[in-house]
Amino acid sequence: MKYDLEPTLPAPSSTTGVIGWMRRNLFSNATNSIATLIIGYFLVTLLGPALQWAFIDSDWFGDSPAACTSGGACWAFITYRMDQFMYGFYPETEYWRINITFLIFAVAIIWLVTDKTPYKGYVSIFVLFIYPVIAFYLLYGGSFGLEVIETHKWGGLSLTLVLAIIGIVAAMPFGILLALGRRSNMPIVKAFSVIYIEFWRGVPLITVLFMASVMLPLFVPEEITFDKLLRALIGIILFQSAYMAEVIRGGLQAIPKGQYEAADSLGLSYWKSMSFIILPQALKMMIPGIVNTFIALFKDTSLVLIIGLFDILAIVQAANSDSAWLGFSTEGYIFVAFVFWVFCFGMSRYSQNLEKRLQTGHNTR
Amino acid sequence: MSTPDRSNKENSATQSSSGSFWNDPDKRSLVFQVLLVLGLAAVFLYIINNTLTNLEQRGITTGFAFLDVEAGFGILQSLIPYTETDSYGRTFLVGLLNTILVSVLGIIAATFLGFFLGVGRLSKNWLISKVCTVYIEIFRNIPLLLQIFFWYYAVLRTLPSPRQSIEFLGSFLNIRGLYMPELVGTGGFNVVWIAFFAGLVATWLMKRWADKRHDDTGQEFPTLYAGLGLILGLPFIVFLIMGMPLTVEHPELKGFNFVGGMVLIPELMALWFALTIYTAAFIAEIVRGGILSVPGGQLEAASALGLPRGKTLRFIILPQALRVIIPPLTSQYLNLTKNSSLATAIGYPDLVSVFAGTTLNQTGQAIEVIFMTMAVYLTLSILTSIFMNWYNSRKALIER
């Protein structure tokens, strides 16, 4: 007689390991198998040559198209002009100013988004109030012995970042006021906010930029002139504050009514209850939404090329028509697409993570 | 624009919290609003005053009289007859129609592609779902303008000249565009159109009758097949009776270019592809969200009732998913229409490119032109939000 249990047999090999995974996920039935094979075939036939073109047969360095002899992608076109794509027509000896400006910004932002770093409050005050002044003097100059660099020399990725960051930061206070106005009990304030928000949200950014560049000079006395960058920024801020207001309104609506009532019952004035009770809670929940509008704005900054500013797309577009380097527009566009993609995808991943972490119980019903 | 008035409000609120007048919220809000109105009026008067002075100094007349002046420039593509001797008013119309054309084409294509990708991302097949995910994550994170440039400058502008056209299915693709055979209806073809619309009306009436009978008696009627028969079959029979009044016009190479047939200019193709590919990525996410929003219990309930798969999809999942999908979908359609204004970057003659571009530059009447252009987009967005409110009120869950 045998009283011990037989050792358990392993699961059939067709349900475990690679084969099991493939049977479950790729070949679960006839239709799926056919679909897998067709798509797999296309992927192999398309991706193979694409990889060959981009990496195996490519040339990375050189100072003329003659350096591209391998028959694949000519990345030399990009690397040769990398400085221009990053800094525009900024004088080469002054590149350090742009580097320092964005280095400070990057450090501050990393400080703010990392968990458990101390003094977050001070850092955010620095970013919002002190940093813009430092950045202005570093980038534009005109003081502290720094040479003035006119804005028409700015360009490339640094201009894209300047437009997007100033656009979002400056639109923030207007957005908060408009969102509060839209939820206000005062009919005229409410009507003004609604009309403002719906107007700017209803028109394409390109008409706003056209308006800023053609109509803005007509609106002010002739003595006052705006340079092109400032005009574009005004247009972007007017436009962006409407989108910002809607994000903030969403955050305000998510705050339970009890919080408003509690603030009222403590006898806090409207502005005190907003700035100490409601906005601190609401702003935290709005961060994902703000990041998403920032991504949209970041992509939209490429539109400034239509009014003649040289952001990264415009500068690559100009390089494409350089007669010494004709025929490399595909490489140029892939490079710009890659730069935008890295920024946008990174930010959207961050905002998704944040959304998951910020579930502090407000949204659950 | 509105900062000064707003900071005034704040100051007056904090300064005078002791006075009894300021402690009355009604009076206080009245004062704020009067200040806001005064502030806004001052800003607007200042702007209008400056504008009028500036315009006078530059010798630009105001008003809409320029709309009747001869335009004197050609337009690449026009859906209505247009020549250089037509007025600026007509350029507005041509541009508007071109905007509508590319938007409608884009909306149709993006909806199909988007639904396909959205469902594909939820597929149990690992390869399909990964391919769809990669597509979505790539194309929605790249600026639309860049995609338009890519299709236009890197793809369509590098096609061969008309003599070396790529030929397929009787169509010719070259640097000037895609030349396709065109179906031209000859005498009596209008009757076919009448039959088509009659079929539509008849299907609608039949659907109402079938629904009513279903409600009353529970008997089902094959509305789908009968409807298809009415909408497609009826015109086809009429078409045969009329003696097939249709000829095919083939494009032919004459001199340096093709003549005859239908042509898609490369500007339209580039814009259409880019808008479709970009918007489809967003629509796919909306569709996915909509399908995921249907609780799993609904599926289980449907199979407990013994509904087959097709009916579960048609009567249980889709109606509930569409309620979530439609509102953001309409706003994507609106975005696509607004984004079509990027046409100006590659010279597709849309409203912004023709009217806010060429016409504005020739007449110098910035205020009127920009105002009219913005008004078009605003009207579209107001119509969209009216539709959305109507749809929401019709489809909102009625809870007991």
Image (cartoon, coloured by chain):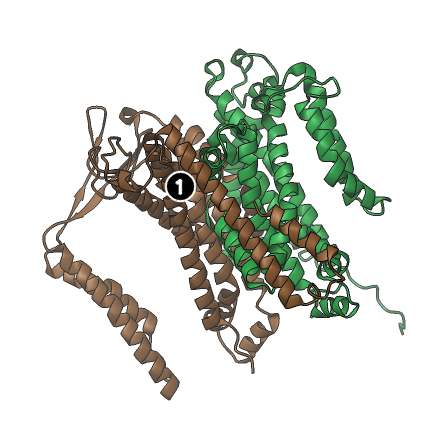
Chain colours: A green, B brown
| Residue occupying image coordinates x 46% and y 39% | A206
Callout 1: residue from which chain?
A: B
| Residue occupying image coordinates x 44% and y 68% | B390
In the picture, measured across the screen, residue B42 lies left or right of residue A285, that is left
Where in the figure is residue A93, as x and y percent of width and height?
Answer: 69, 14
Residue B95 lies in quadrant: top left
Q: Which one is in front, A352 or B288?
A: A352
Amino acid type at image mark 1: Ile
Residue B89 lies in quadrant: top left
Where in the figure is residue B178, as x and y percent of width and height?
Answer: 31, 36
Farthest residue in the bottom direction? B217
In the picture, measured across the screen, residue B215 lies left or right of residue B258, that is right
| Residue beneath disc 1 | B370
Where in the figure is residue B55, as x and y percent of width and height?
Answer: 39, 33
In the picture, measured across the screen, residue B54 lies left or right of residue A140, that is left
Mark 1 surroundings: few (<14), some (14-19) or many (≥20) residues within 10 A: many
The image shows residue A132, relative to residue B240, as above or below, that is above
| Residue occupying image coordinates x 19% and y 24% | B255
Where in the figure is residue A55, as x and y percent of width and height?
Answer: 60, 26
Is residue B239 among the parts visible in the rendering? no
